[in-house]
Image: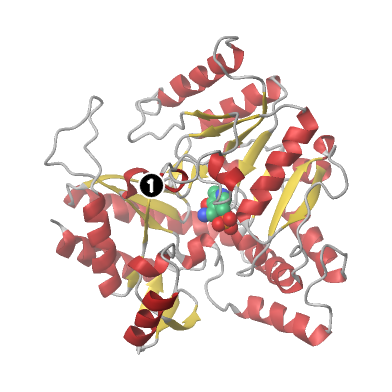
Amino acid sequence: RNDAFLKMQEHRESNARSYPRRLPLAVKRAEGIHITDMDGKQYIDCLAGAGTLALGHNHSVVREAIEGILKSYLPLHTLDLTTPVKEAFVDELFASLPSAFAQKAKIQFCGPTGGDAIEAALKLVKTATGNRAILAFQGGYHGSTHGTLSISGTLGPKMNIGSLVPDTHFLPYPYQYRCPFGIGKDGHQISSTYIENLLDDPESGIVTPAGVIVEVVQGEGGSVPAPLKWLKELRRMTKERNIPLIIDEVQTGIARTGKMFAFEHAGIEPDVLVLSKAIGGSLPLSVVLYDRKLDKWEPGAHIGTFRGNQMAMAAGQATLNFIKKNQLAEHVHQMGVYFMDQLRSIQKEVVSIGDVRGRGLMLGIEMINPSKQPNGHGSYPAYPELARKIQQECFQRGLILEIGGRYSTVIRLLPPLIITKSQIDDVLHRLNEGIKSAEI
Ligand code: PMP
């Protein structure tokens, strides 16, 4: 039966479809960390809606919140009008923010995607500063619209588009495994000094920017955590120059990295914070939170029809509440440490694993080809064919993983945050088997 669905998909769906190509299954049911296909085969889901399903599939608190909305006879959609559900969501979200930021923050509800909220953030800082340029980072990913694509590092999807938003400059992210700016004990320092020079050099070719946008841990870029000291430096240099710092926590937010927000690890705060994915508790929702000093845009400066999804707000509130009540961020931290230790043990046995890294339950395994020549600073070439093969072998063994990162050579793991130690052992077992049979 799975095959029949896949055949239909091949015939009717666009050539631009993505996940179904590498994960050939039709989903019938999902609960917790598991999904079941049409033939009854069960998989562990370490993709979790690209990090959206914080509490896994169909968690009881999420289901109850959604059922509560249905029973309430509230309008299911309200544009951005206020309802008690929306107010309760905002209260819960503000209570989840670090208090200093919460006190100065304002919230803008955006269209249902992360990309739409990033668009809003860009327009916000441009309007507030009167400047035009945006500084973004190599390897960053912020969405798929023209604006967000313009500030994303990935070249592939840009090639056939052209005419993207001008005045975007890319800075080196301290990607410690491969980027010369990240390598070594002081790599992050070299990177931040370089950035500071660019900001101050009148001949750097970079005009005073409207904002700097950064992911604290690059997600699609290959689960690459920025060193905390580097983040502190970035915060210092943007603050000193009055440049708004936009932190894109679309993927890292809502406890994914072991704190409610990933910037908290570095003890910094954004001027603008973008949230989506898990903030809607499995349903589409996105928001921008920002320092009220920047609130200089006009009414209607960022509109869009679908900004009032009551079910998403209720599910998001229930998710935030559950995370706090059950200290899930701490659980994520502990599970992340355990997972990482185990991945390091696997790395010792497998020569084609160049790097394992991540923060909390946002992990990456970078595959390399050690039979080729290393580059100037000692890292071996990427091995995307092997990463792909491992993904397929794991899929056969009932484990869903995603591939990402530069050169598509990073195996990414984003399990639901509720995953237990014994479930992680199960993932590791399947992963190990998958790697063994894939080595080519
Ligand atoms: N920013 C980050 C960091 C993301 O990971 C993503 C999605 N992967 C986006 C923005 C875009 O979100 P969406 O796909 O909902 O537009």
The residue where tag 1 is placed is 405
For image coordinates 46% across by 73% down, the residue present is 33
Q: Is residue 376 left or right of residue 209?
A: left
Give percent across and percent down for residue 260: 62, 53
* Residue type (three-letter) at the residue carrying disc 1: Gly
Q: Is residue 267 above or below residue 254?
A: above
Tell me if 378 is positioned left or right of 4 in this view: left
At which x and y percent is residue 117? 68, 51
- Front residue of 355/345: it is 355
Please state which of residues 23 and 234 is positioned toward the viewer in this rendering: 23
User: Mark 1 CB in 8 Å range of ligand 1?
Assistant: no
Determine whether 132 is above or below 119 in the image: above
Residue at 55 percent of width and 34 percent of height? 136
Determine the residue positioned at 22% across, 65% down.
434
Crowd class of label 1 (few under 14; some 14 to 19; many from 20; radius 10 Å): many
Residue at image position (23%, 24%) is 376
Q: Is residue 127 visible?
A: yes
